[in-house]
Image: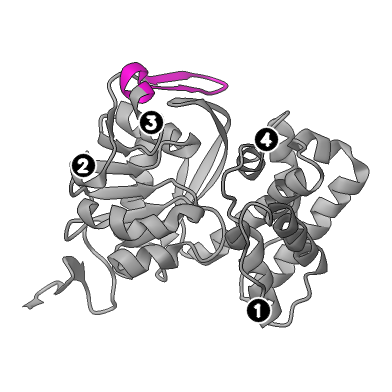
């Protein structure tokens, strides 16, 4: 149907350049898929800001309903006493915004979870780590609905609905396969009004490579070096040097895809990590507790992409195989092509 300002397609309004022009309401209805550290942290902030937030909870729902969500940061305490928590997406229904905060290892469940949450104009924002995480979401809901965010944050869940955030950091978000739109900036504003430093960016894939600069070495070495926390990596000369060499390989691979990340960005990662103190990266926590780890998204996919463009990443590939070997007794991982 032709309109003066664009064309209606799948519920979205597009102009002649293919720009998405649907806007979020001031106080949107939000579904948080997953009540882990990130889901509780950002969900609690959005709820305290007056948004209508609904949590889809896999475990610990009774505790969250009884005691709410409590977040501790270096400067404040946040408590949401009355939490809207559900066991099934059908109980929530369509929302303006769906935030995926479960790990990518649970993406096979999205085909069932997401459809009941979708309306014609619903935005779906994934907070997952690694490369290739927007594609499974797009397969379910359509790429025009999908955005991704990179969370530079230090959060751990110590109990159901209880989160300690040692480094609030910032969120950078972008569109899947598109530059930032008006709605991207509106979404960034929504987080900002909830007390989250947030920026809309034009290149989501570059953001993902930037996050790998931290995730590859610190999540990986924490596991491969025997279950150590970040301050041990920083204090050990050999591990610290290995972390830097891994970062350099990520930068070299990213550059081959047109994402030039300055070397100063590596120094920034060490500075930020030092502020975390004795910090257990999320992959280490999952490893200790026997939960699935995003081995393909964080280590396997970067290796495959680097090899596809002829960039040698020997340290990264070695780390991938080491972690894969350590996880083999629990669940086999896909092979590197």
Q: CA distance from mark 4 to mark 3?
A: 23 Å
Which residue position is annotated with label 4? 280
Magenta residues, as a range? 63-79
Which residue position is annotated with label 1? 337
Q: CA distance from mark 4 to mark 1?
A: 31 Å
Q: Nearer the viewer, mark 1 or mark 3?
A: 1
Residue 67 picture location, percent across and down = 36, 17
163 or 56: nearer the eye? 56
Q: Residue furthest right?
A: 237
Q: CA distance from mark 3 to mark 2?
A: 19 Å
Residue 233 picture location, percent across and down = 81, 40
Quadrant, the C terminus: bottom right
Which residue position is annotated with label 3? 45
Secondary structure at badge 4 equals: loop
Quadrant, the N terminus: bottom left
Secondary structure at badge 1 equals: loop
321 or 44: nearer the eye? 321
Residue 38 picture location, percent across and down = 47, 38
């Amino acid at each position: 149907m032709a309109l003066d300002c664009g064309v209606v397609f799948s519920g979205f309004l597009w102009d002649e350049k293919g720009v998405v022009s649907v806007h979020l309401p001031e106080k949107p209805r939000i579904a948080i898929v997953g009540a882990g550290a990130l889901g509780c942290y950002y969900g609690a902030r959005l709820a305290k800001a007056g948004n209508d937030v609904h949590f889809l909870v896999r475990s610990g729902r009774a505790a969250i309903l009884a005691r709410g969500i409590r977040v501790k940061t270096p400067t404040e305490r946040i408590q949401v006493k009355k939490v809207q928590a559900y066991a099934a997406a059908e109980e929530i229904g369509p929302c303006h915004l769906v935030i995926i905060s479960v790990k990518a290892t649970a993406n096979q469940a999205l085909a069932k979870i997401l459809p009941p949450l979708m309306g014609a104009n619903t935005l779906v924002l994934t907070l997952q780590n690694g490369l290739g995480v927007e594609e499974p979401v797009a397969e379910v809901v359509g790429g025009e609905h999908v955005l991704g965010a990179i969370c530079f944050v230090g959060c751990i869940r110590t109990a159901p609905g209880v989160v300690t955030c040692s480094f609030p950091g910032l969120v950078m978000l972008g569109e899947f396969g598109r530059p930032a739109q008006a709605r991207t900036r509106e979404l960034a504003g929504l987080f900002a009004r909830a007390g989250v430093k947030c920026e809309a960016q034009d290149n989501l894939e570059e953001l993902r490579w930037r996050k790998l600069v931290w995730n590859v070495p610190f999540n990986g070495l924490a596991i491969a070096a025997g279950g150590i926390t970040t301050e041990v990596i920083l204090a050990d000369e050999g591990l610290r040097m290995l972390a830097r060499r891994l970062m350099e390989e990520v930068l070299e691979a990213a550059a081959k895809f047109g994402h030039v990340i300055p070397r100063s960005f590596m120094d920034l990662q060490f500075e930020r990590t030092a502020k975390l103190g004795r910090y257990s990266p999320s992959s280490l926590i999952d490893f200790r507790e026997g939960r699935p780890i995003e081995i393909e998204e964080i280590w396997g996919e970067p290796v495959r992409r680097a090899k596809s463009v002829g960039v040698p990443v020997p340290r990264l590939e070695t780390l991938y195989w080491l972690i894969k070997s350590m996880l083999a007794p629990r669940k086999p991982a896909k092979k590197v092509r």
